């Protein structure tokens, strides 16, 4: 069974072909970083226009690299929520058009479900790692999302959010702090590199949502503390202050992410933790998460970076089982800016999924 996955929810135009054994036959990602870099963040209108420009060539390239034609596909999966409205619409409309023209079934996929199952993808050019065992706790930290999930099985009904950021996503905080420091966009990789040579303990920035009990995050206060430091001391040049400031900021973000992830794993008595999202590229996060997991006898699964960042393969894989069951969302498929995954808080108070 061959499924085409289409992803246009934010700033990557992506398409991939995945088979029923989660093997990625092709995986094409067209990044819009250059489009948004001058603005220091994603501009929704520009994102939608750029998706429109690139989505067809990206899909064609995915088919070409997999050595298949559109007519040989068994179905199409497309991200339909959550994301930027205009950006989502491009992918969904193209998917609907293809499904109608080719007479193929089409299913809509929650982008977060795609991320939560991305550790199951297998790439022919990489050594195969054992997939995570259910149940697991997943930390998803990207430019658009930062939340912890409990995943009991592959169906979206078996996934629930345990806590999310109240304000900025972790990647967004990296990007905004980098903007304040004049380091360009995206900020994560630059801060990651500078922080390696800095002292995380010299500059005091306060700790974001330090309470171990809470599984919620908040990074905007930390970002404000960096802004205050810059107001008081001026923007650091390419010197020790810059490296120490990056190291201090990163240490606080990483420490918070790792502590809360481990708290969730211990509280839920799960033996596996999975990292996902672009921030999973962060070296300190990988190292500290690995050390914290080893200390508790927990298996840490960090998928290859191409599976962690936005891609079409995770969407194809997440849609595959519904397509295999003969389900079809076309032509009524709609987009939504919100996830449908439920949130379960500690006290058992649940937030109902947004329709
Ligand atoms: O998952 P992703 O590619 O796209 C979405 O946001 O959906 O994540 C991009 C985010 C950006 O905010 C970027 O600054 C951050 O991931 N990022 C990093 C690193 N590499 C990328 N953050 C910290 N350290 C990194 N090495
Ligand atoms: Zn994402």
Image (cartoon, grey):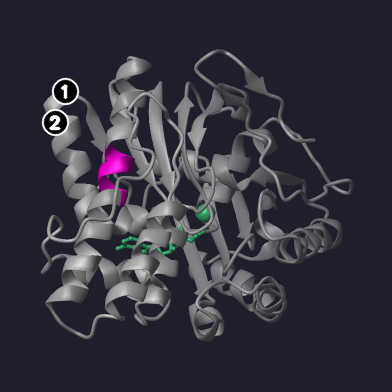
Q: Is residue 104 above or below residue 88?
A: above
Left or right of residue 318, residue 331 in this image: right
The region drawn magenta spans 253-258
Q: Position of residue 38 (x, y in %)?
A: 52, 86
Residue at position x 42%, y 68% in the image: 175
Badges 2 and 1: C-beta atoms under 8 Å apart? yes
Apparent side of residue 135 relative to residue 85 in the rendered image (left or right): left
Outermost residue, front side: 232
Q: Is the magenta stretch mostly helix, strand or loop?
A: helix
Mark 2 lies on residue? 294
Q: Does residue 130 appear in the picture of this structure? A: no
Q: Where is residue 137 shown, x and y percent of the image?
A: 39, 29
Nearer the observer, 89 or 25: 89
- Check residue 35 for magenta coloring: no
Tell me if residue 254 is in the magenta stretch. yes
* Neighbour tally class for label 2: few under 14, some 14-19, many 20 plus, Cα within 10 Å: few
Q: In which quarter of the image is ligand 1?
A: bottom left
In the image, 100 versus 211, the foreground residue is 211
Checking the image for residue 297, the label placed there is 1
For mark 2, give the secondary structure. Answer: helix
Q: How many marks?
A: 2
Q: Nearer the viewer, residue 297 or 202?
A: 202
């Amino acid at each position: 069974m061959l499924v085409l996955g289409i992803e246009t929810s934010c700033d990557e135009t992506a398409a991939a072909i995945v088979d029923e054994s989660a093997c990625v036959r092709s995986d094409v990602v067209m990044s819009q970083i250059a489009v948004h870099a001058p603005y220091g963040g994603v501009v929704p209108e520009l994102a939608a226009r750029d998706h429109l420009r690139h989505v067809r060539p990206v899909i064609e390239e995915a088919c070409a690299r997999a050595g298949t034609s559109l007519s040989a596909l068994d179905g199409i999966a497309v991200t339909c929520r959550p994301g930027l409205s205009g950006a989502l619409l491009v992918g969904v409309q193209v998917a609907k058009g293809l499904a109608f023209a080719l007479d193929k079934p089409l299913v809509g996929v929650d982008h977060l479900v795609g991320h939560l199952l991305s550790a199951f993808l297998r790439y022919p050019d990489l050594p195969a790692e054992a997939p995570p065992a259910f149940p697991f706790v997943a930390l998803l930290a990207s430019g658009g999302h930062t939340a912890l999930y409990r995943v009991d099985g592959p169906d979206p009904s078996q996934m629930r959010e345990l806590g999310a950021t109240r304000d900025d996503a972790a990647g967004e905080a990296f990007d905004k702090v980098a903007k304040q420091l004049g380091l360009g966009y995206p900020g994560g990789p630059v801060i990651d590199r500078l922080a390696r040579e800095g002292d995380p303990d010299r500059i005091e920035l306060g700790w974001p949502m330090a309470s171990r009990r809470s599984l919620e995050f908040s990074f905007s206060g930390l970002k404000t503390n960096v802004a205050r430091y810059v107001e008081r001391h001026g923007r650091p040049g390419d010197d020790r202050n810059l490296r120490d400031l990056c190291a201090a900021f990163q240490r606080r973000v990483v420490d918070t992410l790792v502590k809360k992830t481990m708290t969730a794993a211990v509280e839920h008595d799960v033996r596996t933790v999975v990292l996902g999202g672009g921030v999973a590229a962060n070296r300190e996060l990988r190292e500290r998460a690995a050390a914290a997991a080893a200390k508790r006898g927990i298996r840490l699964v960090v998928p290859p970076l191409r599976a962690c960042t936005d891609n079409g393969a995770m969407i194809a894989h997440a849609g595959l089982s519904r397509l295999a069951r003969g389900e079809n969302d076309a032509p009524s498929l709609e987009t939504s800016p919100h996830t449908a995954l439920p949130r379960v808080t500690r006290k058992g108070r649940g937030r109902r999924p947004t329709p």
